[in-house]
Amino acid sequence: MTQHNWTYNDDIVAFFLSRYGLDSLLIDIKAIGKKLGMSPGSMRMRTQNFKYIEYGEGLNHPARLSKEVFRDYQKTSRSDHYEKAKEIIYDK
């Protein structure tokens, strides 16, 4: 698989997964990666970048885009974030 160019929407999904896991998405990480055009490992690493941004734990080299998504979505309710992540995943 070629290197994935992360989009804002990809990071919205990664941030959701870092906070809430696969809760209610009815899809596994492998299927999410396939729908968004990345490996499951790449998605797992990106979620760890969000854990670092939010809690200081995880992978400590978050992208500028991830920091932007964090700023934009950190106060978003779980239900609103879920709806947006679901829209991104299932509209692919």
Image (cartoon, grey):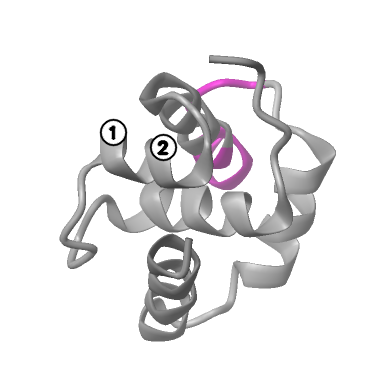
Q: Is residue 55 above or below residue 59?
A: below
Please identify the quarter of the rendering in which residue 25 is found: bottom left
- The stretch in magenta equals 50-60
User: How many numbered discs, if any?
Assistant: 2
Give the numbered dot on residue 33. Answer: 2
Q: Secondary structure at mark 2?
A: helix
The residue drawn where x is 56% and y is 41% is: 50
Q: Is residue 52 magenta?
A: yes
The residue drawn where x is 29% and y is 41% is: 31
Please identify the quarter of the rendering in which residue 80 is found: bottom left
Pointer 1 and pointer 2: residues touching (CB < 8 Å)? Answer: yes
Q: Is residue 84 left or right of residue 9?
A: left
Q: Is residue 4 magenta?
A: no
**Front position in the image: 55 or 17:** 17
Which three-letter amino acid code belongs to the residue tagged 1?
Lys
Question: Between marks 1 and 2, how big is the CA–CA gap?
Answer: 5 Å
Residue 40 at x, y percent in the picture: 37, 27
Residue identified by numbered label 1: 30
Give the numbered dot on residue 4. Answer: none
Count neighbours of disc 2 (C-alpha within 10 A) and say few if under 14, some if 14 to 19, many if 20 or more.
some
Q: Is residue 41 above or below residue 89?
A: above
**Front position in the image: 81 or 2:** 2
Which three-letter amino acid code belongs to the residue tagged 2?
Gly
Q: Is residue 50 left or right of residue 5?
A: left
Residue 56 at x, y percent in the picture: 56, 33
